[in-house]
Every structure is written in C-alpha cells, then in structure tokens.
C-alpha cells in the first residue's frame, strides 16, 4: 500500500535523516502501543536504528515524528 502524507507534514519533520523511509518500508515502522493527547505516541521498535524523533522515558519509547503520527492517524498503522 502506498502511504501518502501532505507536503506540510513532510516539511514539519525537518529532523528526519532517513528520507522518509517509513513511507516506503512499513515493516520498519515502530508499532504504536498507545497515544497521549493525540500528538504523542508510545511505540515499540523492533529495529535498533537511531531516530531524532525517538525519545526514551524510563522503560518506554516516545515517538514525536509528525510523519509517523500522521500515518497512525490516517492509516491506523
């Protein structure tokens, strides 16, 4: 499935160093386990890849990527 996000969302993800791989390689997406206030996602990541939007809070991982959040909202993935 081809995933589409607006140019505005892409531009807001200015810290992305992976050329928006998440739009093309869904198998690499961190799994969303829960959300908070509709703008913060708690995720479980299988790959150990670094990401500027991945933050650790004790034992949990928070994703603040605007593209990933849009994918979750739009496609429920």
Image (cartoon, helix red, strand yellow):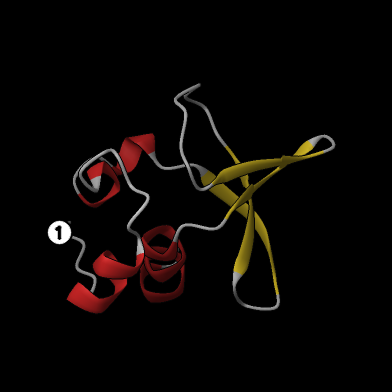
- Identify the residue under disc 1: 2
Q: Nearer the viewer, residue 29 or 54?
A: 54
Labels in figure, total: 1
48 versus 53 height, above or below: above
Mark 1, residues whose alpha carbon is within 10 Å: few (<14), some, or many (≥20)?
few
Q: Residue at x 45, y 65 (%)?
A: 72
Q: Which quadrant holds the C terminus?
A: bottom left
Outermost right residue: 58
Q: Residue at x 51, y 48 (%)?
A: 53
Q: Which quadrant holds the N terminus?
A: bottom left
Q: Nearer the viewer, residue 12 or 22?
A: 12
Q: Nearer the viewer, residue 9 or 32?
A: 9
Outermost top residue: 48
Residue 38, position in %: x, y?
Answer: 62, 77
4 versus 52 height, above or below: below
Residue 37 horizontal side relative to residue 67, left or right? right
Outermost front residue: 14
> What is the secondary structure assignment of the residue under circle 1?
loop
Among the 4 quarters of the image, the one containing residue 18? top left
Outermost left residue: 2
Residue 66, position in %: x, y?
Answer: 42, 65
Q: Residue at x 41, y 42 (%)?
A: 29
Among the 4 quarters of the image, the one containing residue 17? top left
Q: Nearer the viewer, residue 70 or 9?
A: 9
Residue 25, position in %: x, y?
Answer: 24, 40
Residue 42 horizontal side relative to residue 14, left or right? right
Q: Residue at x 18, y 46 (%)?
A: 24
Residue 12 horizontal side relative to residue 73, left or right? left
């Amino acid at each position: 499935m081809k995933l589409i996000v607006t140019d505005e969302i892409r531009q807001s993800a200015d810290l992305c160093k992976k050329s928006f791989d998440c739009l093309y390689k869904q198998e690499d997406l961190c799994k969303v386990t829960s959300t908070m206030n509709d703008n913060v996602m708690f995720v479980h990541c299988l790959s150990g890849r670094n990401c500027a939007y991945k933050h650790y809070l004790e034992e949990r991982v928070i994703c603040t990527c605007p593209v990933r959040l849009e994918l979750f909202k739009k496609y429920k993935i």
